[in-house]
Amino acid sequence: MIIGLVSVIMIFGIPIVAIITSHLSSQTELKAKIIEDQIKLEELKHQNYLLETDKMRRELEAQLKLEDKKLV
């Protein structure tokens, strides 16, 4: 009786464990891909911030030069 129960559990248990392990592995890979994409997005946001800041600095310098010319 016990031997039959153990053999049934082994026959069905091993494939189920393999399926669950495979599923967890694929979920982990997807999470890693999402994190990589988020890191790339943050890098792009940072680059955009730097470009916008530089653009505003140049515009401000140009405005200050125009105001200085008007005062002279």
Image (cartoon, rainbow, N blue to C red):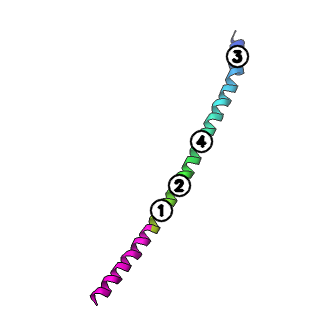
The residue at which mark 1 appears reads as 46
Q: CA distance from mark 1 to mark 4?
A: 27 Å
Discs 2, 3 touching: Cβ within 8 Å:
no
Front residue (pair 45, 10)? 45
Mark 4 Cα-neighbour bin, 10 Å: few <14, some 14–19, many ≥20:
few
Q: Secondary structure at mark 3?
A: helix
Q: How many labels, in total?
A: 4
Front residue (pair 42, 52)? 52
Q: CA distance from mark 1 to mark 2?
A: 11 Å
Amino acid at circle 3:
Val
Q: What range of the chain is rendered magenta?
A: 52-72
- Tell me the quarter of the image containing the C terminus: bottom left
- Labels 4 and 3: the sequence-earlier one: 3
Q: CA distance from mark 3 to mark 1?
A: 57 Å
Dominant secondary structure, magenta: helix
Amino acid at circle 2:
Ile
- The quadrant holding residue 57 is bottom left
- Labels 2 and 3: the sequence-earlier one: 3
Mark 2 Cα-neighbour bin, 10 Å: few <14, some 14–19, many ≥20:
few
Q: Secondary structure at mark 4?
A: helix
